[in-house]
Image (cartoon, rainbow, N blue to C red):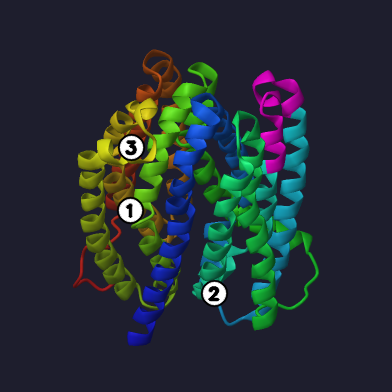
């Protein structure tokens, strides 16, 4: 048990380090980028990155969760893991190729995309990197130490490139390329580590296995697609309805929020494969672990939300300056989200998914995404970036309440510590 807890702790540290590199390190370059690119140029860059996130979403499909669960429950079965690895790698590469062709067509169909074509085309390297990087394998095996260290090193190494090569408003595509480099390079490191540790052997691609992986990941793909309706889509809608300035203001606040959420999300990510494994071997212990995680995460998210609300003006002023003053108000509106999302993570991912309620999980997120789509256009049209913040907050609250309702409806005995399950 001590060894188990130590492994989880190490993985929390590793995932926290990745989040730190992914959210905190970009904040180092943000003051420079918003100054050099100016609000409009930074808005175009943010708009382009948001569009590319759709491509990343499709490439990920639902494999990050579905494959992680399978690896966690069969981590010593080399042939089983190899089957999953090669088939998912093939699927991701195929999807990324199709996605690139679709993106090229869309660039020539829509003027808003054609205006930022170089941001999109160079930035697509990050999508290719995502296709090649099997994070789910490392997470399922709970072996995140070296790959996390390598990822952080690559991201830190790329930071100086922004200051060297991004010099004016015309260099937005250069910034997009530099953002993509770490994701592409880490996939090379991952392949080396996997080969060295002999985690996989060569296997033929099987149509039946591909079909099974697609089916297993479908509900999770729908879930992540639905989530994008009230996360990524907001940036795109703002760019269309309100223009690049509103995108810059909202994105600036949202980046700080994401960095703050990175303080607790590694904890739940590290516990997910462990809870999956326990659900197979000892449900009572799995529920006990969930209760423990809920207490820890709830305290942390309260502190984060209060901190965001109280210190938003100071943080925005330090990072962005006077031109982005409205970002502080947006950040205050978004400040309850860490508490809300922290709870929905427990109810949804840690309870519903690990107990096998994938369909209910994806249905909630799909409905939530549709509700947000109804809200977002009028709110963004009327209130610009403030409307975007309201729509996100309302949607996240709906998700959390719905997840809790299903947990109660299904009578999942997660809170009953003395009951045999």
Q: Nearer the viewer, mark 3 or mark 2?
A: 3
Q: Is residue 240 left or right of residue 87?
A: left
Structural crowding at the residue carrying mark 1, measured as other residues with C-alpha within 10 Å and reported as few (<14), some (14–19) or many (≥20): many
Which residue lies under the disc numbered 2?
146
**Which of these two is toward me, 72 or 314?**
314
Residue at 64%, 82% in the rendered image: 197
Q: Position of 11 compared to 176: left or right?
A: left
- Relative to residue 134, is residue 372 depicted above or below? above
Q: Point out the residue furthest to the right here.
A: 204
Residue at the spot of label 1: 347
Percent across and percent down for residue 48 are 60, 33
Question: Which of 138/20 is in front?
Answer: 20
> For numbered disc 1, what is the local secondary structure?
helix
In the rendered structure, which disc, 3 or 2, sits on the residue that comes first in sequence?
2
The residue under the point 48% across, 17% down is 242
Q: Is residue 111 magenta?
A: yes
The magenta segment is: 106-122
Q: Nearer the viewer, mark 3 or mark 1?
A: 3
Q: Is residue 96 left or right of residue 240?
A: right
Number of numbered callouts drawn: 3
Please tell me whether mark 2 sits on a helix, a strand or a loop. helix
Question: Is 144 rendered above or below residue 89?
Answer: below
Q: CA distance from mark 3 to mark 1?
A: 32 Å
Question: Residue visible at 60% across and 32% down?
Answer: 168
Give the labeled residue for mark 3.
316
């Amino acid at each position: 048990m001590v060894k188990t807890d130590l492994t989880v702790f190490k993985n929390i540290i590793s995932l926290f380090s990745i989040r730190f590199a992914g959210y905190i390190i970009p904040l180092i370059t943000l003051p420079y980028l918003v100054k050099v690119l100016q609000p409009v140029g930074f808005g175009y860059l943010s708009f382009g990155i948001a569009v590319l996130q759709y491509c990343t979403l499709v490439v990920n499909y639902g494999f990050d969760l579905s494959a992680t669960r399978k690896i966690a429950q069969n981590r010593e079965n080399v042939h089983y893991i190899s089957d999953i690895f090669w088939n998912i790698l093939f699927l991701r590469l195929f999807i990324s190729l199709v996605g690139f062709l679709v993106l090229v067509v869309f660039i020539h169909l829509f003027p808003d995309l054609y205006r930022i074509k170089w941001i999109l085309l160079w930035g697509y390297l990050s999508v290719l990197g995502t296709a090649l990087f099997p994070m789910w394998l490392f997470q399922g095996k709970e072996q995140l130490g070296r790959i996390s260290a390598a990822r952080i090193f690559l991201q830190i190494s790329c930071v100086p490139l922004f200051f060297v090569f991004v010099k004016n408003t015309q260099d937005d595509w250069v910034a997009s390329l530099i953002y993509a480099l770490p994701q592409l390079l880490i996939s090379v490191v991952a392949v080396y580590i996997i080969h060295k540790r002999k985690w996989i052997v060569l296997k033929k691609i099987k149509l039946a296995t591909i079909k099974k992986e697609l089916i297993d990941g479908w509900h999770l793909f729908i879930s992540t697609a639905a989530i994008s309706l009230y996360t990524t889509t907001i940036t795109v809608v703002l760019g269309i309805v309100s223009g690049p300035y509103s995108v810059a203001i909202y994105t600036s606040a949202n980046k700080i929020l994401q960095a703050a959420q990175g303080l607790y999300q590694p904890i739940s990510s590290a516990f997910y494969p462990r809870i999956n494994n326990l659900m197979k071997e000892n449900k009572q212990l799995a529920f006990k672990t969930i209760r423990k995680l809920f207490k820890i995460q709830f305290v942390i998210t309260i502190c984060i939300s209060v901190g965001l609300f109280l210190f938003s003006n100071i943080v925005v002023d330090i990072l962005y300056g006077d031109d982005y003053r409205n970002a502080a108000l947006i950040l205050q509106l978004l400040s309850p989200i860490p508490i809300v999302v922290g709870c929905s993570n427990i109810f949804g991912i840690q309870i519903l998914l690990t107990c096998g309620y994938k369909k209910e999980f994806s249905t909630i997120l799909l409905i939530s995404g549709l509700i947000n789509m109804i809200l977002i256009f009028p709110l963004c049209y009327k209130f610009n970036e403030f409307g975007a913040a309201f729509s996100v907050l309302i949607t996240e609250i709906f998700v959390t309440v719905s997840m809790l309702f299903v947990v109660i409806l299904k009578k999942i005995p997660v809170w009953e510590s003395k009951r045999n399950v």
